[in-house]
Image (cartoon, rainbow, N blue to C red):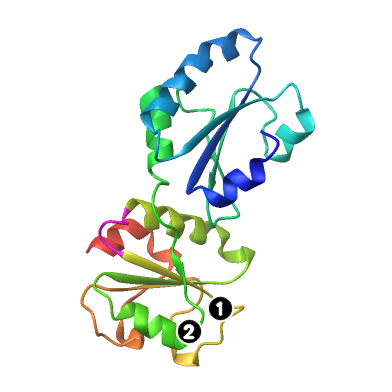
């Protein structure tokens, strides 16, 4: 797994299990991990790493106890973790992986790009800036995968893209959705993280 960075950059989803293959727990979870690889074959890259062989590498990704499952989504900096409180069984692992499958939001780099995107049926645009928006951005990217068959997601980093002031009237982070094409961006309802989970707001 020496070329792990290339795996994470070129594949939509890469999921890695750091484990101790000599421990009783490691021997218990290894066949379950093989089942996961078969279940998501062709949709995600599934790998396993002997965490005891390179503790520094494992700890770099927060794998300080084994088994630890980490998921890398193309286009996202955040590493997703399969929580220790969840039962290590195939249905739970498969759901964890499949909820992240699908295209990442399309980066929009100008006001014109935003307008062109919002002309599409079911278009969604999220405005984000910096680490303060990290939690909201994580939820947005997750919904982009889950709702990929219903909506077309775009994303704007307002620290790098100059937008007219009226485009920022809803604040940052914020999300707008066009259930019908052709509605001006500034006339669309605004979602902010304070409104609660994103998914119910999208589908209403």
In which quadrant is the N terminus drawn?
A: top right
Question: Residue 147, relative to residue 63: is it above or below?
Answer: below
Judging depth in this view, the residue of 39 and 135 nearest the camera is 39
Mark 2 or 1 closer to N-term?
Answer: 1
Q: Residue at x 43, y 53 (%)?
A: 142
Q: Residues within 10 Å of mark 1 (few under 14, many from 20)?
A: some
Judging depth in this view, the residue of 29 and 175 nearest the camera is 29
In the picture, measured across the screen, residue 67 lies left or right of residue 52, that is left
Question: Residue 61, relative to residue 113: is it above or below?
Answer: above
The answer to which quarter of the image holds residue 37 is top left
Total numbered labels: 2
- Write the start and end of the magenta stretch as one range: 147-151
Judging depth in this view, the residue of 171 and 56 nearest the camera is 56
C-alpha distance separating marks 2 and 1:
9 Å
State yes or no: residue 149 in magenta. yes
Q: Main secondary structure of the magenta part?
A: loop
Question: Residue 63, relative to residue 156: is it above or below?
Answer: above
Q: Residue at x 39, y 32 (%)?
A: 94
- Whether pointer 2 and pointer 1 mark residues with C-beta atoms closer than 8 Å, the reply is yes
Q: Secondary structure at mark 1?
A: loop
């Amino acid at each position: 797994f020496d070329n792990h960075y290339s795996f994470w950059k070129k594949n939509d989803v890469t999921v890695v299990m750091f484990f101790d293959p000599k421990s009783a727990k490691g021997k218990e979870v290894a066949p379950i991990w093989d089942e996961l690889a078969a279940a998501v074959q062709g949709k995600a890259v599934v790998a396993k790493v002997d965490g005891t062989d390179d503790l520094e590498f494992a700890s770099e990704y927060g794998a300080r106890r084994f088994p630890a499952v980490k998921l890398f989504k193309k286009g996202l900096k955040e590493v997703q973790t399969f929580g220790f409180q969840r039962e290590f069984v195939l249905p739970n692992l498969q759901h964890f992986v499949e909820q992240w499958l699908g295209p990442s939001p399309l980066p929009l780099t100008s006001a014109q790009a935003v307008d062109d995107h919002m002309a599409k049926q079911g278009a969604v645009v999220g405005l984000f800036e910096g680490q303060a928006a990290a939690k909201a951005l994580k939820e947005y990217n997750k919904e982009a995968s889950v709702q990929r068959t219903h909506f077309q997601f775009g994303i704007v980093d307002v620290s790098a893209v100059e937008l007219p002031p009226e485009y920022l009237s809803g604040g940052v982070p914020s999300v707008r959705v066009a259930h019908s094409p052709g509605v001006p961006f500034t006339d669309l309802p605004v979602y902010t993280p304070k409104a609660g989970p994103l998914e119910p707001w999208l589908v209403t």
